[in-house]
Image (cartoon, rainbow, N blue to C red):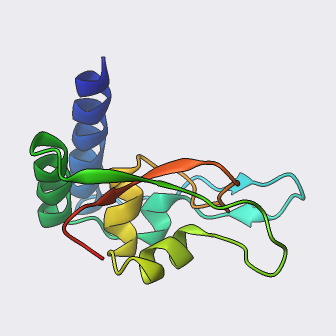
Amino acid sequence: MKHFKVSNAILMILLTVVLSSFVEITPIKNNDKAGNAVLSTFSICKFTFEMIAEVHRLKRCNEIKEFVIPDYNPNDIWSWWRVAETHEVNFCLLLLLNDVANANDLKAGQIILLPTNYK
């Protein structure tokens, strides 16, 4: 079932890339609990075939590790941007590796995947 999800995600990305060359695609805007617009991952990142291939390679070769978000501290809030910066991983690659649709703040104790060949 997991392979189906990954294959489906890759096909959707490829379809989006192909269609975007013919039709202007407007991303669907979601709202958070406060009613603020939240940008989808597709509107933040321009995914490349190299990124998709790299994520596929990382998963196939099992070159990923788990990272647990630390306990909540109001002065030390973790976000996807911060994880990417701290571990020196490409932000869009990180979102693609974790199948993230909306790059919201992370919750304490949440487990995310990181490539092992990075910091």
Residue under the image location 27 percent in, 61 percent down: 115
Q: Quadrant of residue 22?
A: bottom left
Instruction: Report whether residue 46 is seen.
Output: yes
Residue 23, position in %: x, y?
A: 33, 58
- Left or right for 90, reference 48: right
Foreground of the two, 116 or 54 = 116
Residue under the image location 32 percent in, 75 percent down: 90
Residue under the image location 70 percent in, 54 percent down: 108
Farthest-out residue, top: 1
Q: Quadrant of the C terminus?
A: bottom left
Farthest-out residue, right: 34
Q: Quadrant of residue 3?
A: top left
Residue 55, position in %: x, y?
A: 20, 53
- Picture layout, residue 24 above or below residue 118: above
Foreground of the two, 92 or 85 = 85
- Left or right for 14, reference 20: left
- Picture layout, residue 38 above or below residue 10: below
Residue under the image location 20 percent in, 63 percent down: 51
Instruction: Report whether residue 24 is seen.
Output: no
Residue 114, position in %: x, y?
A: 35, 59
Q: Quadrant of the N terminus?
A: top left
Foreground of the two, 16 or 73 = 73
Q: Quadrant of residue 4?
A: top left
Image mark count: 0
Residue 112, position in %: x, y?
A: 47, 51
